[in-house]
Amino acid sequence: MQKLYGILLLGFFATRLVAQGGNPCFTLPKMQIQIKKRMLENRIMWQNKAISIPPTPVYIPVRLWLTANSNGSDRYVKYLELFQFFCTTNECIGNKSIQFYIKEINENLDNSLVHKDPLGQGFQLIVDSTKLRQDAINIFLTDFIHPTAGAIFLFNHDFILLDDHFVQKESGILCHELGHYFSLPHTSGDWFDYQCNIPTLDQRKGMVFPEYVSRTKVDSNGIQICNYAGDGFCDTDADYGEVMNPNTPCSYTGCAKDPDLVNLNPDLSNPMTIGSYITCFDSFSTQQRQAILFDFLSPHRDYIKTIYTPKGEVIEPKYLAPLDKHQFVRNDSLKFDWEDAPNATEYILEIAQNINFTLNLLQFKTTQSEYLVRNLSPKKVFYWRVLAYNSNSYCLKEPQVSIFTTGALTTIIDNDFHQNYNFTILNLSNSNILRIKFATTWNHSILFSLFDLSGSLVLKKTIANQEIDIDRSNLIPGIYIFKFITPEHKMVYSKLLLN
């Protein structure tokens, strides 16, 4: 029997986690028993059967549901961070035999009950949504799960809920929940929070068999106890599910002893521990990886066994417009353009007011290599970048960043208005005077302003008798923009060429 390949990924402290202490995974002991039962059933099913691992990876579809409030607000859409988080997850749980790809990023579930209370009032709405799309692993990113927990795998409904505050590049929480999805219980089994002042055999909380530190200890039938006690794996260390010390999250400082009074020393780098995987996850054991493969091959997982041919690598596109450090005279309608990226199926244009893309971030998804953006703030410096990707290119590097500055002017286009307020521009002979005559009669004076292409005001006058004269002798030849506001409070802009 061939074995799944090993994987390795170093994890670092996740700074945005909202659950302080406790168990970030809310998959409770009752569900752990169900998960472990399936794992043991799979083990029996595939016992002594030859398993042929294909030469190319099996690709498993994942659908990410980005939920929001009923009015569409508060959706998690930091795409680069989301892609990097998924990349870390794929490296953690995947290998040369199994890989994941993003079948869909769904942004159409706008319901405050789902977003804020997915385990309560919003639960049935999630169940109904999942049933309609049982063709991928469904993962719902919500604003809240539980006061002390950030994720849960719902065994009976076969989907994952994830607090979107845990979405970070170096977080192992989704790797942990996908481990549950593929029949891996916590390393502690259904043990939950060992109590030092109570004898071990008196606090098993439903466990039929206590786990021992010794991996060779056998029961009265000569069977290794580690094959069915705890998480049911002999190549993971005994673990009684103690809450991790936040001061030493990757080093065990607990007090647990097994029934033989041997001190425990659980492996806190295993992704299936109940807390340290957030900070210091490393890799699954050989038997855990084997169990993942067994579960994938079982009938329970037929709905994710799809034929998928991965697309090629996406090449980062070259930006065409706006040019780097370009200064606009206007801000209302700016076209962003970039070269087509080979193998890309979608682009995300990001615009923000700082280089870290955290200040007033705007994001636009498109299948085209251009996008028209309207109504940016005037006289502001903006940074922009393009994320080009396809369903299997989520391990994105930080893309190049370009910068531009918006102008002060905003153009309003109204066909009916321009028909009612026509004007003509006349060069008066033998003088430097340029006259603008308006066809409409007004009952009071109108303020007229003239700007250069940098957005600077160069002239402000009152329109009298439906005309205004501009002395060109003090103006540099070039293109200018004039503006006036009508009595109906409509704003007119027009270009003016001074020779």
Image (cartoon, rainbow, N blue to C red):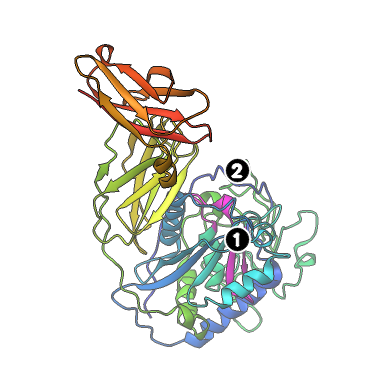
Vertical relation: 432 (above or below) 350: above
Whether 164 is among the magenta residues is: yes
Q: Nearer the viewer, residue 71 or 471?
A: 471
Q: Position of residue 148 (x, y in %)?
A: 69, 52
Horizontal side, residue 464 vs residue 132: left or right: left
Q: Residue 373, relative to residue 482: is it above or below?
A: below
Q: Would residue 253 appear left or right of 293 to someone viewing this image? A: right
**Residue 285 colored magenta?**
no
Magenta range is 151-173
Amino acid beneath label 2: Thr
Around disc 1, counting alpha carbons within 10 Å, would you say few (fewer than 14), some (14 to 19), or many (20 or more)?
A: some
Which residue is at a point 32% across and 62% down the rendered structure image?
Answer: 345
In the picture, the quarter occupied by the N terminus is bottom left
* Residue at the disc numbered 2: 248
Sequence-earlier tag: 1 or 2: 1
Considering depth in this image, is 430 or 298 the residue closer to the camera?
Answer: 430
Give residue 280's position: percent from left, percent from top: 52, 50
Inspect this view and state whether residue 397 appears.
Answer: no
- Rendered image: mark on residue 110: 1
For numbered disc 2, what is the local secondary structure?
Answer: loop
Question: Which quadrant would residue 121 be assigned to in this image?
Answer: bottom right
Q: Are marks 1 and 2 in contact (CB under 8 Å)?
A: no
**Which residue is at a point 47% across and 55% down the rendered structure image?**
282
Task: For residue 311, say whether it is visible.
Answer: yes
Residue 386 image offset from top left, x and y in percent: 34, 48
**Amino acid type for the residue under numbered disc 1:** Asp
